[in-house]
Amino acid sequence: MGTRYKSIEDGSLATTLVLETIQSASTSKKQAHKKNMIKFELTEKQKSDIKEAFDLFDPDGTGKIGIKDLKVVLRALGYEPTVKELQTLVADITPECPNSLSYEEFMKIMLIKMTDVEESQSEIIRAFRLFDDDKTGKISFKNIKRVAMELEEELTDEEIFDMINQVDEDGDGEISLEEFIKLFKKMSC
């Protein structure tokens, strides 16, 4: 496929989704103190990125992608589903098991995948490693700044520090894998 597919396949879309989740936690955590609970919601950018991935496999604009393409699309978005998991997801969304999925059906599958933290811990670890390129076991200011620049996200230093501080439980100024996983578990509540 073209360069658009390459950029998604190499993990940048998954990285974008993770960066937006951290940003969302930073904003949501302040608001959630009243409710003592954080809800996971897709941002408009996340929805747009998912639509872009869908559209890559719908070049004719039919509004459908083949079931056989589902695994490739999910992998491009940072997930590693098994054949059995794919069959279950499709059966849950479309009991008649068609040969293709609409965008709405695909979005339902993505919501299931993105909110099923227990099933997706390996995807969370993979996303963590995309940030932790220096392999320190922590996501630092420098790591987030690099990812934001690569994705052309305009984040101020203050916004990045705020994001870290909202997730950093031990106060070391960095996000550990444990803190990162807790973030995703909170976001799925």
Image (cartoon, rainbow, N blue to C red):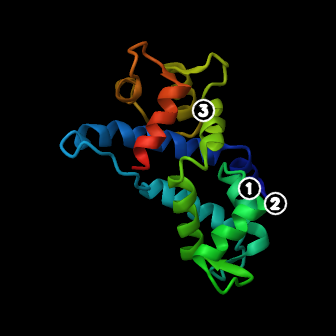
Left or right placement of residue 188 versus residue 106 in this view: left
Image coordinates for residue 138, horizontal then vertical, percent: 56, 20
For disc 3, the neighbor class at 10 Å (few under 14, some 14 to 19, many from 20) is: many
Residue indicated by mark 2: 1
For the residues bearing labels 1 and 2, Cβ distance under 8 angstroms? yes
Q: Residue at x 71, y 48 (%)?
A: 7
Residue indicated by mark 1: 5
Q: Residue at x 56, y 47 (%)?
A: 118
Of marks 3 and 2, the one in the foreground: 3
Q: In the rendered image of this protein, does residue 189 appear above or below residue 72?
A: above
For the residues bearing labels 3 and 2, Cβ distance under 8 angstroms? no
**Could you say whether the residue bearing mark 2 is in a helix, strand or loop?**
loop
Circle 2: residue type: Met
Q: In the rendered image of this protein, does residue 30 appear above or below residue 50?
A: above
Quadrant position of residue 53: bottom right
- Would you say residue 126 is visible in this rendering? yes
Question: What label sits on residue 106 in the rendered view?
Answer: none
Image coordinates for residue 6, horizontal then vertical, percent: 76, 50
**Could you say whether the residue bearing mark 1 is in a helix, strand or loop?**
helix
- Give 122 or 147, whichever is nearer the viewer: 122
**Could you say whether the residue bearing mark 3 is in a helix, strand or loop?**
helix
For disc 2, the neighbor class at 10 Å (few under 14, some 14 to 19, many from 20) is: few
Image coordinates for residue 54, horizontal then vertical, percent: 64, 67
Q: Residue at x 30, y 38 (%)?
A: 29
Q: Residue at x 43, y 58 (%)?
A: 44
Circle 3: residue type: Phe
Q: How many marks?
A: 3
For disc 1, the neighbor class at 10 Å (few under 14, some 14 to 19, many from 20) is: some
